[in-house]
Image: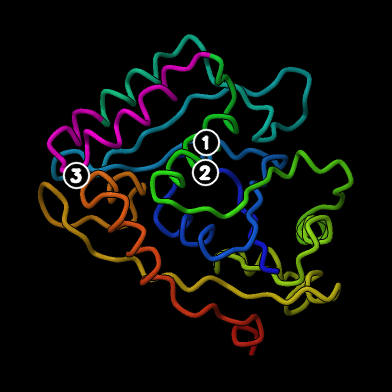
Amino acid sequence: MLLSIMQPTYLPWLGYFGLINSADKFVFLDNVKLEKSDWHVRNKIKSGKQELMLTCPVRTPKGRMTATIENTQFVSANPWRRKHLKSIAESYAKAPFFSSLFPLLDPIYKDESITCLAQMNIKIIKVLMGYMNITTPTFTASQFKGVSGVKDARLVSICHELECNTYLSPVGAQAYIEQETPGGALVKNGIDVFYQNFIHPKYPQIKGEFISHLSVIDCLFNVGPVETAKLINTCTRAHTHYQSLSV
């Protein structure tokens, strides 16, 4: 059983959904430290011929030394939701699939009961999964009360909780996992490790030259859910075994 674990990103890129689609089970790592400059709170879309960064304003919980993604709340006085919706609408109003996708995003941004970062990010991701018919079962790390440890030890604990013996990681997390030994604590605990091999595709965009590594919604607005799902499948190459990167 193959498991993948990732922090819930704001409007993730195509490769994020490639990771979800490749896994038998997927866990949102929501109970780890928030980095305000990271992709938890921001991502890029294409506005006209240029990329535009959308950033969610958040505040650190009072009385806590560190903020986690699950307990980080939005700055309520900042009208960022309206601004983000307006930017998305203005950027993609003439895109072929605007009329089918925008009505799915609009109510999420207008839902005032969504007050924290993890809620928003996970809700958007799940809605986009449904739009693309990605059916991988998802969980949140915070729902597992028996999970313990930090860094790769936490990943081991989650794998055991979900009875998974193979772990699929984004390649950028190799240094995080293998600080001490190839495969890290995962391999030491009998869990095989593979790294994602995702080649970003080029697809039609409504204006200007192609810009890569934007939010997945750019691809969805331009080519739709069926074609985007096909691109995710075809651009996900054979996973790389940890031993191949540890020589």
Locate residue 175, reporting x and y percent. Answer: 65, 68
Q: Is residue 146 above or below residue 78?
A: below
At x 63%, y 69%, the residue is 174
Q: Which residues are magenta?
A: 89-112
Q: Residue at x 46, y 47 (%)?
A: 129
Residue found 54% across the figure and 77% down from its top: 239
- What distance separates the C-alpha of mark 1 from that of mark 3? 24 Å
The residue under label 3 is 50
Cα distance between the residues tagged 3 and 2 = 22 Å
Quarter holding the C terminus is bottom right
Label 1 sits on what residue type?
A: Asn
The local secondary structure at tag 3 comes to strand
Q: Amino acid at mark 2?
A: Thr
Image coordinates for residue 212, horizontal then vertical, percent: 28, 58
Point out the image quarter for the N terminus. bottom right
Q: Mark 1 or mark 2: name the one nearer the start of the chain.
A: 2
Among numbered discs 3 and 2, the one appearing first in the sequence: 2
Residue that badge 2 annotates: 9
Within 10 Å of the Cα at label 2, are there few (<14), some (14-19), or many (20+) other Cα atoms? many
Task: Report helix, strand or loop for mark 2.
Answer: loop
Q: Amino acid at mark 3?
A: Gln
Badge number at residue 121: 1
Q: Is residue 187 left or right of residue 193?
A: right
Q: Nearer the viewer, residue 160 or 246?
A: 160
Q: Does 93 appear in magenta?
A: yes
Task: Return the disc, 1 or 3, that comes first in the chain's sequence.
Answer: 3
Quadrant position of residue 171: bottom right
Horizontal side of 46 relative to 55 (left or right) equals left
Evaluate if marks 1 and 2 touch, with contact meaning CB atoms under 8 Å apart. Answer: yes
Looking at the picture, does residue 221 appear above or below residue 109?
Answer: below
Q: Is residue 50 magenta?
A: no
